[in-house]
Image: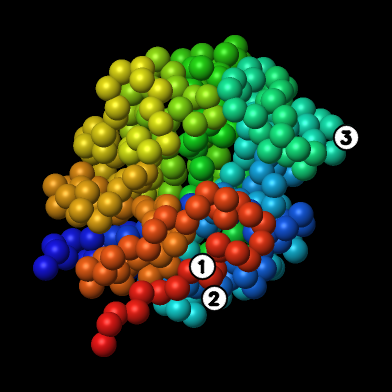
Amino acid sequence: MHPVSLLSPWQIKDLTLKNRVVLAPLTRARAGTERLPNPLMATYYAQRASAGLLISEATVVSRQGIGWQNSPGIYTDEQAIAWRQVTEAVHGQGGLIFLQLWHCGRASHSSFHEGGALPVSASAIAIQGDDIHTPTGKHPHEVPRALTTEEVPLVVADYRQAAQRARDAGFDGIEIHGANGYLIDQFLQAKTNHRTDRYGGDRPGRFLFLREIVEAVLTVWPAERVGVRLSPNGVFNDMGSPDYREMALYTAAELNSYSLGYLHVMDGLAFGFHGLGEPMTLAEFRPVFSGTLMGNCGYTMESAEQAIATGAADLIAFGRPYISNPDLVERFAHGWPLAEDAPMAVWYSFDEKGYADFPVYEAAI
């Protein structure tokens, strides 16, 4: 019999998670060109509601934040109303769900934006390497436009408004996406933040954008209903800075002062590693962050159990296994085998195939 730790409850202040298994935020691109949640998405999340916590796919806080085809938004009242069918479906299955707030920043393209406006970032530094999929096909990344000092508070206000709409939509909380080379990460990292105003320079300056976002959403949500996601090891979207360890620990320590619900760290290397030193581990965050700590990226049931048993993590988020195993918790609980990973072709296919059509495990009678 496997240890009970992964399947035992966890308390985040007044919120009781029935187990330590979390549905990681997974962009699945089923919201259509209007970026509206729909009944198919409600079915998908409800199928996975046996997780202790569901974190929604990344959801853009503004039109300016768009950088992915058919991903959902939370910048209109219509979108907030549409999200209610998702939250109600999850709650109907006894689940809890947080909405992940997202701004792509430079990980976007002018073809996503009205009038062909350039994507924005902390500084005018382009992503090198992979092309981007856009409404007009595949293109190289463009040099983004650096947000002016006066514009940054307007983006912060977009996050606050998105947080309010998430509350109106019936979510149990929100997660601020500060990882994977998107806008907040672009401000945090020295590689992409060459600013000379108050939002750049030393670590407090690079952290200021995230600080202001946290303080803005805390006018809407109690602190225990807000999480933040970081990816100190990540190379995705051409990231990786020489002071990655020091900046991540500084960020975690500063976030700790707000008594947030959790810190979500992509400590695994399944998305690649920038190789600028030794990979960071969850254990490094324990001395500086006293709240709930969530690990993610490439965990198996066995490695998750070990992380929880050693106290390195309180919660573990699973991504890829959840695509083809809507009943992942039940499979863990009964020792049932996992289904094969879904092919990448269906991850972002825009249609029903490979989304909510994966079967639950049927044990032999």
Residue 138 in the image, given as x and y percentages of width and height: 71, 34
Q: Quadrant of the N terminus?
A: bottom left
Q: Is residue 147 visible?
A: no
CB atoms of marks 3 and 1 within 8 Å:
no
Q: What element carries label 2?
A: helix
Q: Is mark 1 on a helix, strand or loop?
A: helix
Residue 228 in the image, given as x and y percentages of width and height: 44, 44
Identify the amino acid type marked 2.
Answer: Ala
Residue 222 in the image, given as x and y percentages of width and height: 46, 56
* Above-or-below relation of 293 to 278: below
* Above-or-below relation of 120 to 224: above
**Residue plotted at (57% across, 55% down):** 346
Q: Which of 253 and 1 is in front in this view?
A: 1
Identify the amino acid type marked 1.
Answer: Tyr
Of the two numbered discs 2 and 3 on the same chain, state the one appearing first in sequence.
Answer: 2
Residue identified by numbered label 3: 115
- In the rendered view, does 339 fall on the left or right side of 99? left
Identify the amino acid type marked 3.
Answer: Gly
Residue identified by numbered label 2: 89
- Residue 45, numbered label: 1
- In the rendered view, does 247 fall on the left or right side of 292? right
Residue 16 in the image, given as x and y percentages of width and height: 32, 68
Q: Can residue 124 be seen in this view?
A: yes
CB atoms of marks 2 and 1 within 8 Å:
yes
Q: Nearer the viewer, residue 280 or 76?
A: 280
Q: Distance between the residues labelled 2 and 3?
A: 38 Å
**Residue plotted at (78% across, 32% down):** 110
**Residue plotted at (14% across, 64% down):** 2
